[in-house]
Amino acid sequence: MGRKVHPMGFRLGVIRDWQSKWYDDKHYAEFILEDVKLRRAVQAKYTDAGISLVEIERQANKVSRNDSYLAPGHRYRPRWAKVEEMRQFLEGVLGGKKIQLDIREIRQPEMDAYLVARSVAEQMERRVAYRRAMKQSIFRTLQAGAKGMRILCSGRLGGVEIARRQLMHQGRVPLQTLRADIDYGFTEAHTTLGRIGVKVWIYKGDVFPAAEVTEEVTAVEAPVVTTTIPIAAAPAAPAKDTTMAEAVARMTEAPVKDAAELLRKSKNPRPGRRSKPSLLKLKRRVMKSL
C-alpha cells in the first residue's frame, strides 16, 4: 500500500476538528452539495487571494444561514476591500441563501502548507528553477519555527518531455503519529507544458491534550502520596568533647590492641585449620604494625 491517507483527515477527532460543522437528517445530501459548490466557487474565482481554509458552520434551527470563515494571507489583504461583493457572489452560488463572512488573517504564511505550495507553484509559472523555489520555501518555513518540512513536485519539471517527481525534505515529518500537528497543502502550477502538482507537509510539533496530561500526573503521584508513612527519627547521640591528648592516646592504643589480639589467637588456634606462623614471624608482624 502507498501513502494514500490524507494527513488532515487521518487526525480528525484526535487533534483536528471538522471543516464543516453542522448536522441534519432530512437535508444531508443537499447540504453536502452546497458545501462542495461553495468551496469550488471560492477556489475558482479567488485563486490569487491566498485562501487556505474555508470553514462552514450552520445553526441548528437556521438552515438558510451559512458561516464561511476565510483565511487569506496578509500580503493579499488589500484585495479584500470588496467583502460585500464576495458575499453577494456566494449567495448567488447557493441560490439566494444568506451568508455571513468572517475573514481572518494568517499571521505566519510560511507556516501554512497551502500558501507555501501556492508560492512554489507561482514561481514555477514564472519559470523560476523548481529546485531553487523548493529550497527557499523549506528554508523560510524552518526559520519561521517549523520542526520539519517535506515538499513534493511531480510533472514535467524543467520542461522535459518525461514527467518525474522531485522530493525534498528537512527535519522530522512523522506522518503516522496521530498527535503530530502536520499541516498539508496541495495545489497545481499551470505552465505552458502542462500542470505540475505541488504537495507540502509541515510538521509544527506534538499536541498533547490537557485532560490526558492531568490524568497521567495523578496516576503517577497517587501511589507516592498513599504509601508515605511517617517514621520517628532516632535520637542523636550526644557529642563528646575530646581533647588533643585523648585523641593521641586512642591512636597509640589501637596498634597495641591489634597485637594483643594476634597473640591471643596464635595460642588458641581453631580446630581443623592450619597452625599459625612461628612466634618470630608474629613478632615481626607486630613490629611492622607499630
Image (cartoon, rainbow, N blue to C red):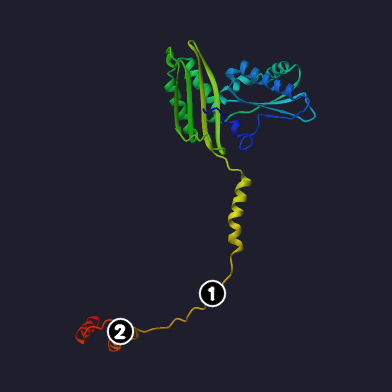
Q: Which residue is mark 2?
A: 258
The x and y percentages for residue 128 are: 44, 17
Q: Which residue is mark 1?
A: 233
Mark in front: 1 vs 2 = 2
The image's mark for residue 245 is none
Give above or below for 28 relative to 239. above
SS state under label 2: helix
Spatial CA span between label 1 and label 2: 35 Å
SS state under label 1: loop
Q: Is residue 266 left or right of residue 224?
A: left
What residue do we see at 33% from left, 84% from top? 250
User: Residue pushed farthest top?
Assistant: 192
Quadrant location of the C terminus in the rendered image: bottom left
Q: Quadrant of residue 87?
A: top right
User: Residue pushed farthest right?
Assistant: 61
Q: Is residue 11 left or right of residue 24?
A: left
What residue do we see at 30% from left, 84% from top? 258
Q: Is residue 227 left or right of residue 255?
A: right
Give the residue type at disc 2: Asp
Q: Quadrant of residue 46?
A: top right
What residue do we see at 48% from left, 11% from top? 193
The x and y percentages for residue 111 are: 53, 31
The x and y percentages for residue 234 are: 52, 77
Give above or below for 179 relative to 73. below
